[in-house]
Image: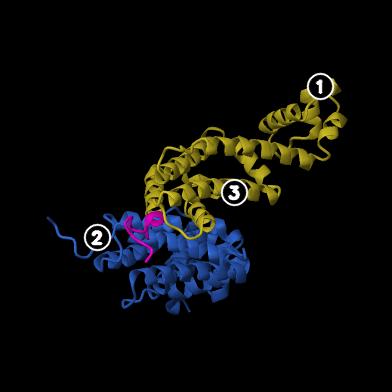
Chain colours: A yellow, B blue
């Protein structure tokens, strides 16, 4: 058995064990049992329980990053892309919180176990927002002298719709209106100071 | 003694008791003891412990509302007023969280005990933001077709800097930069779509 045991198989089994037992109870022994191997075989791939949990979390977050990147339409306007991207993230988090509250809570615990993980996750997503804004600056749809800082500001300004501390507000019947109003305000902010298209340098 | 016992004196004593014992342990008997009266005398003014706690919370929030309203300078521009108002709120909350963490936690518990209280508090503050925006619309500094909705959007977009769920981020050394970036973006959003001053109706 040991020679066919891949890191990927361990990660899949660990995610399933976490889903079943929750983050407080899931152990490496449970993962080994689910795979029909000894816990030593699991430790050969992941030196510690913490390393295994971090790898599962990163794998799960990477899937989200790929999905979020796919929302960006290279043919779309920057405003359309930003709106669609923020909406997709909000819908994804809201549905996950409503439909799979235990899994949502599990991953919330996992993400908060290491300082490196939230930084990794937020860094990736803010990087995607920066990509959208940069495209908007290139087409003169948006104006900013600091794309990275502005991307972080967009992220912060919309945190009611992605930060898990606000998850209990996502069931509010007016939450979509609130989202629309904030996103409009943010997009108007990104457009302000747009250089008139006929302006010269001199 | 009973004839000089005012509701105000009870509220002052209750705040002190809450400050000393915390929200979980403070009782009406403690309040009565601190005032040297029977608990019956306290109940003559406040029918239940919940009513007393709610009255203390409202009194404390009202003082904040008065202080926040005083930040608005009738001679200032709307952008200056909005920035100063948001900064004052942020500084106030941040200092309270850093310097008096137990009192901050106490009032956080009190505010969350009744659904009416957060609505009352947020409603008041969003009303002040609406007042600032309306003044900006009157002077054509800001543009919006819905002042109330926009005020709520400004409140939501800045929640990282006033919502207690984010209090653990307020010690971040870059938090003031993050605040400045969000407030800039929001103010730019409020200015966008400004009708050119020479525009006619026809």
Q: Residue furthest top?
A: A1
Quarter the N terminus of chain A occupies: top right
Q: Mostly what secondary structure, the magenta segment?
A: loop
Q: Is residue A184 left or right of residue B23?
A: left
Residue located beneath label 1 in the image: A4
Secondary structure of residue under mark 3: helix
Picture coordinates of residue B89, whole percent (x, y): 47, 68
Specify start and end residues of the magenta stretch as a single range: A189-202
Which numbered circle lies on residue B195?
Answer: 2
Structural crowding at the residue carrying mark 1, measured as other residues with C-alpha within 10 Å and reported as few (<14), some (14–19) or many (≥20): few
First in sequence: mark 1 vs mark 3: 1
Structural crowding at the residue carrying mark 3, measured as other residues with C-alpha within 10 Å and reported as few (<14), some (14–19) or many (≥20): some
Residue A155 vs A32, above or below: the answer is below
Who's the residue at 33% across and 58% down the image? A196
Distance from label 3 to label 2 (Cα)?
A: 37 Å
Instruction: Tell which of B1 and B146 is nearer to you.
Output: B146
Quarter the C terminus of chain A occupies: bottom left
Tell which subunit mark 2 falls on.
B
Residue B28 visible in the displayed image? no
Secondary structure of residue under mark 2: loop
Which numbered circle lies on residue A122?
Answer: 3
The quarter holding residue B103 reads bottom right
């Amino acid at each position: 058995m040991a020679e066919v045991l891949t890191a990927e198989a361990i990660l899949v089994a660990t995610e399933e064990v976490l889903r079943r037992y929750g983050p407080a109870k899931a152990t490496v022994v449970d993962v080994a049992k689910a795979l029909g191997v000894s816990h030593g075989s699991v430790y050969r791939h992941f030196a510690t329980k913490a390393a295994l949990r971090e790898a599962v979390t990163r794998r799960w977050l990477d899937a989200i990053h790929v999905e979020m990147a796919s929302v960006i339409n290279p043919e779309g306007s920057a405003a359309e892309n930003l709106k669609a991207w923020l909406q997709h993230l909000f819908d994804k988090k809201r549905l996950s919180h409503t439909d799979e509250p235990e899994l949502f809570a599990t991953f919330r615990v996992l993400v908060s176990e290491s300082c490196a993980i939230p930084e990794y996750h937020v860094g990736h997503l803010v990087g995607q927002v920066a990509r959208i804004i940069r495209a908007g600056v290139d087409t003169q749809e948006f104006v900013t002298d600091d794309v990275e800082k502005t991307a972080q500001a967009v992220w912060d300004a919309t945190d009611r719709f992605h930060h898990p501390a606000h998850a209990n507000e996502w069931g509010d019947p007016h939450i979509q209106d609130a989202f629309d109003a904030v996103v409009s305000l943010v997009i108007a902010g990104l457009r302000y100071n747009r250089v008139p298209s006929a302006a010269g340098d001199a």
